[in-house]
Image (cartoon, grey):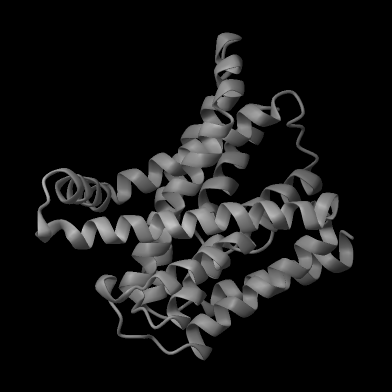
Amino acid sequence: MSWIEALFIGFIQGISEFLPISSSAHLLIFEKLLKINMSDSPLTFEVFLHLASLLAVLLYFRKDVLKLLQGSYQYLFKKDPRSEGDFRFTTLMAASTLITMIVGKLMEGWFGDSITNTATIGAALIITGIFLILIEHGVNEGLRGPKEITWGHAVLIGLGQALAVIPGISRAGSTLVVALWCGLNKETALRYSFLLSIPIISGITLLKLPEIIGQFTDGVGLELWLAFISSFLFAIISIKWLIAMVQKAKLSYFAVYCISLGLITWIFLT
């Protein structure tokens, strides 16, 4: 892989990680279209790009993360009733994550190798486009804030996130549409969706940590670092972009894009 290809792959991963357009689908499509070879160290690239996305969301939501961690500690060990809300929000995210892990694993086994074929990706992108239309035009914004999120909502959002195991289904899109269906307001839905990405991406990274450490012992090439930096920078841009688009009700643009790309993938790449 050349350094230009590495920068491009980092850009695709970073910009699409938090936008509702499915990063996994874009990586698979562009690798196929441009014939980019990642076979020398696919695991290293995959983990590093996820780690870049994790660092981006941690940096952007650092105050929220620190508040939740401090609040959970105060409630658990200092019995501070003022911190109960932070502890409850954290446990709700843990419940959503657990549901995602279980259902996602079952879905991977059910789909098998067909989960990454172009027909599946194309159909999933079209479904993502429909999700985005529903967010903007079919689902009324609710009034529920963080304190009104129930365990049932956490389970449903976790199920929505599990759909993103299919390349083409946007994690951001699926979690947002379910959160809004549950009656959450846009600010709470966005915050829950973004923060929910942290345990999922962390889990992926931790599971593959032994392999990535093995790659480090052999030395990490310039291309990998370029992809990492590119992915990190564009992930931050995508976070800001999605927040602005949801607040301004401009997701129809992404919907048209996903449906168009899905049809192109289904017709010309299958």
**Which residue is depicted at the point 50% across and 48% down?**
200
Q: Is residue 81 left or right of residue 60?
A: left
Q: Position of residue 221 (x, y in %)?
A: 59, 18
Residue 44 position within the rendered picture, expressed as x and y whole percent measured from the top left: 62, 27
Residue at 60%, 75% (x, y): give it. 255
Q: Nearer the viewer, residue 9 or 128?
A: 128
User: Is residue 199 visible in this depiction of the protein?
Assistant: yes
The front one of 145 and 109 is 109
Where is residue 62? Give x, y as percent. 26, 46
Which quarter of the rendering shows the N terminus?
A: top right
The front one of 188 and 224 is 188
Q: Is residue 231 visible?
A: no
Which residue is located at x 75 percent, y 44 percent? 31
Query: Picture quarter containing residue 89?
Result: bottom left
Residue 23 to residue 20: above or below: above
Classify residue 142 as left or right of residue 122.
left
Q: Quadrant of the C terminus?
A: bottom right
240 relative to 187, above or below: above
At 14% from the left and 47% from the top, the residue drawn is 74
Image height of 219 relative to 124, above or below: above
- Identify which residue, 245 or 212, lies in the foreground: 212
Q: Percent x, y for residue 23? A: 61, 53
Would residue 156 appear left or right of 248 to someone viewing this image? Answer: right
Left/right of residue 11 with respect to residue 117 in the rendered view? left
Residue at the top extreme of this rendering: 218
Number of marks present in the image shown: 0
